[in-house]
Amino acid sequence: MNKTIGGNQMKKNKFILKMMTMVFIAILALSGCNKYNQDDKASGNTKNESGKETDVKGSGNPEVFNFATNQDIPHLDPHGTAANTSFRVTYMLYDRLVTYDGKDTEVKPQLAEKWDISDDGLTYTFHLRKDAKFHDGTPVTAEAVKYSYSRAIDIGKSAAGQFSGVVTKESFEVVDDHTIKIKLVKPFAPFIKTLGTVYANIVNPKLAENHGDDFGEQYLSDKDMGSGPYILDSWDRGQKLVLKANEDYWGGAPKLKTVNIQIVNEPSTARLMIEKGEIDLIDDTMLSPDVMKEMEGKEGIEIIKSPGYQIDDIAMNVEKKPLDNVKVRQALGYAINYESIINDILLGAGQRAHGIIPEGMFGYNPDTKLFEYDLEKAKALLKEAGQDKGFELEILISENNEVRKNIAVMLQSDFKQIGIDLKIKTLAWPTFLETVTSGGHQLALAAWTPDYADPDYNLWYFAHSSSKGPGFNLAFYENKKVDELLAEGRTTVDEARREAIYKEIQQIMNDEVPYLFPSQRLVQAAKRSWVSDYDINPMNTWYVPFHKITKE
């Protein structure tokens, strides 16, 4: 049955409806202010000593930090993984004898308060601090240092690369609980620098109770046995990893009591979350330069920029045809429009790279030849190689990295002009890592940042034959002369000779082209303006010092 409403009644109902709507909007607005988290601990309010609520500037509780990344974490054994996404976590869970701090590329004391070096450069004596404890309360001792380094050698993966030919399991002498001597097989100029990297993390010797057949690698893949400023609280793989502050940390308890490392697959989602205040900081690899530019100037958002040692690299598996032919590799070098990558994809946040040693680092060689964008030269080289009839190549990239995706698409377009059909295959980061380290690729687009500022680090991993695959020589490159030079560079303490050695290696690699280097990046990261004390180290651009960060 229809009911007709009179004019006055209709006006009255409209007024009531209008008032109800305004109240509803007000409720939504109020609830939106506290949307950040649903419980008191992470809400926009906190309580003072009298129990009264006080306003807190920033997204929720200043003791809770939300970090977004779209790259998953493979596993957490510091001696068994080469994934930067794992390093971000393990640097917080574990301590090392020495460390890197802030924007400085020189080592600082950590577990070792001081150290002595013998005149012949072979014996290092480390004096450990006496107040450091593992998360289970047991003290960090010289035995723990010996155990950790010996275990890294036994596992024989990425960490072992730094010790290869430098120390053996017989190199370690425990003098007392807080003194250890390490005798090198031969002088190794950057030895102290290597001990500040994630591979030299000190692990609780109690891990030996769970060694099994893999020295406890599987056991430690999702557990924490460190002494660092944070403790692993929980890990929902592919979703979120939670760190809790170590309240008994010898260096002082972190101000951020909870760190949520959230896997946010879509960059657009992460952007929306940080703009709403639900995220405090976004992984610097996640947002593309054009998105960063759009976000600049937005209220409450800061785009921080810092010089970096990150190099974008294309590893060409020289064991796979037709990439075993140097002329084919050279042709690819001439087919890439590098200036377009820097200007159109990176929007100027990068520069041409002469090799794997970045500008600004000792050993950088500015005299290596840069490939010009020359399609005719590229075609001529393919003809000389007998590959001018056209062929297919496949390039692997990791998912959820917009910049690499855009670079791969540009390469696809560039290579098409010289008759190469480039297929792009996108893999989840753990799968990508497993595939390229086992040699299951032709081309692989990735990026590299050194863990310590010495050319030995970059070149040993990229060029030494012992580093093929798991050691991160993803080109599976081998050159006897390069191996000899790398070995000499490690043993001489003459810095002038070392510099000459590393420049020569870069020249050899420039001629043989196992890798191509699209750019050296300027580091950019998006954060909320209430985040303070976040320094970007030019080496460890993926390293986030959660233990030093504060929220105001």
Image (cartoon, rainbow, N blue to C red):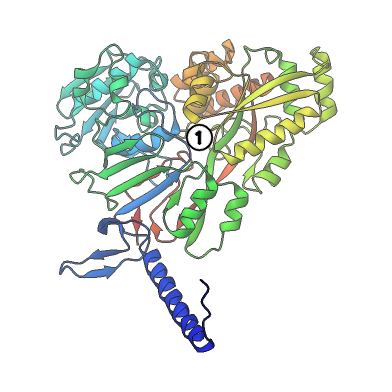
- Is 340 left, or right, of 192 in this rendering? right
Which residue is pictured at 34% across the width and 56% down the height? 37
The type of residue carrying mark 1 is: Thr
Name the residue at 64% across, 25% down. Answer: 395
Picture coordinates of residue 90 (x, y %)? 34, 34
- 213 lies left or right of 271: left
Classed neighbour count for the residue bearing mark 1: other residues with Cα under 10 Å, few (<14), some (14–19), many (≥20): many
**Residue 473 visible in the current orientation:** no
Q: Quadrant of the C terminus?
A: bottom left
Residue 476 is left or right of residue 94, and the answer is right
Report the residue that reaches farthest toward the bottom: 8
Along the viewing direction, whichever of 331 and 258 lies nearer the viewer: 258
* Tag 1 residue: 449
Q: Residue at x 73, y 22 (%)?
A: 330
Q: How far across and down, in percent of the image, does residue 543 sit?
A: 42, 41
Whether residue 142 is situated above or below residue 47 in the rendered picture: above
Please determine whether, in this image, residue 186 is positioned above or below residue 311: above
Residue 248's place in the image compared with 385, above or below, is below
Give the mark count.
Answer: 1
Q: Quadrant of residue 520?
A: top right
